[in-house]
Image (spheres, grey):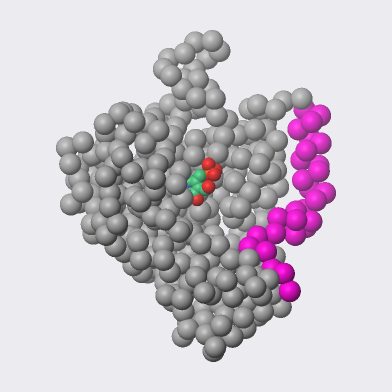
Amino acid sequence: MQIPIIDLKRQHAIMKDELEEAFRRVLESGIFIYGQELESFEKEVAEYLGVKHAIGVGNGTDALILSLSAIGIKPGDEVITTPFTFFATAESIAQKGAVPVFVDIDDKTMNIDVEKIEEKITPKTKAILPVHIFGQGVKMEKILQIAQKYNLKVIEDTAQGIGAKRNGKSLGTFGDLGTFSFFPTKNLSCLGDGGLIVTNDDELAKKVRMLRVHGSPRKYYHQFLGYNSRLDALQAAFLRVKMKYIESWNKRRQEIASIYNEALKYIVRVPEVDEGNIHIYHQYTIRTEKRDQLVDFLRNKGIQVAIHYPIPLHLQPALSYLGYEEGDLPVAEKATKEVLSLPVFPELTEEEVNYIIDSIREFFKK
Ligand SMILES: Cc1ncc(COP(=O)(O)O)c(C=O)c1O
């Protein structure tokens, strides 16, 4: 058996006619930037998330960069974040000339350890940028409390968490701004690059809308330096089709996760969920000290697995100028040596799930 880590052909087969119809609609409209599709998508996704403003941008990385710009992050400012995430989180901070300040992670959820944030705050700290890793919420109530105490802004990197909730509230809607990615491997994806910024703050929304079009409130008038970063009309149209499925997809991910949990809980560390969280398992990530051998074994069995993430960001060569060393953030460093993500995409069949479980059991029996 050959099992991919994700199979978009299966997902798209179910809605081929709808996607083709969306393409036809945009083609015939002749409008490819802004327009009705983008406006409708922004309205629909804002409603889905329960937030006042949703603003489509070019990708999840731009969503972070535009958000940092919107809150006025400047060279030399410090932004507190997690070392256990995709590179873009810290890259966006560094691209603004600011300093990513890494706080170690919580061993249970692998999200930023909120108890260790305050000790990293300095007079230069301007914001906290938590990441809801793998689709599970950060302890936002604590983050908001710290932010209020020290007068900091909060941007939630929700690239992996659309549809997930904490205490009944959608992830991405707790802080000043929330960012999302619709990269093809995401649980809600377009057919290319796409991203989103959400906020309940009218002023920030206005600023982000200008930032995505060269700092311009009206044609050929530029109030400040901005970017060229919109969500294409075509991608918005595709996303409107896929939005109809997101709840059932997330539910199916949870179903697969609970089958894995039951079958694997005595042989590996299965994902642990914090009280109050609805985890959507953008990734189903287990932990074992025999990770590297298990990866080889599963790959030989035809099962594609992934390591999210093999190197913590504080040890990435591109950020070596920050001066971190091995041992500085031990919880994150240990996680990078043990994590392994199994296929969890919604179209995975029962037979495939069972094959993956049987293969893992076989490995641990040997
Ligand atoms: C946590 C996180 N932040 C940011 C990004 C960047 O998103 P994009 O690839 O759309 O730029 C991703 C995904 O790629 C991500 O997983």
Q: Which residues are magenta?
A: 1-29
Picture coordinates of residue 82, whole percent (x, y):
35, 52
* Magenta span contains residue 17: yes
Picture coordinates of residue 288, whole percent (x, y):
44, 75
Picture coordinates of residue 238, whole percent (x, y):
70, 43
Q: Is residue 326 left or right of residue 344?
A: left
Question: Which residue is more in the foreground, 249 or 103?
Answer: 103
Q: Is residue 341 above or below residue 350?
A: above
Q: Quadrant location of residue 113?
A: bottom left
Camera sees residue 165: no
The residue under the point 55% across, 70% down is 295
**The C terminus lies in quadrant:** bottom right
What secondary structure do most residues of the magenta stretch adopt? helix
The residue under the point 59% across, 46% down is 183
Picture coordinates of residue 316, whole percent (x, y):
39, 48
**The N terminus lies in quadrant:** bottom right
The residue under the point 29% across, 57% down is 326
Q: Is residue 365 above or below residue 108?
A: below
Q: Is residue 213 left or right of residue 243?
A: left
Camera sees residue 340: yes
The residue under the point 52% across, 85% down is 364
Q: Is residue 227 above or below residue 177?
A: above
* Magenta span contains residue 194: no
Question: Which residue is more in the foreground, 216 or 184?
Answer: 184
Farthest top residue?
220
Q: Quadrant location of residue 337?
A: bottom left
Give the total of numbered labels. Answer: 0
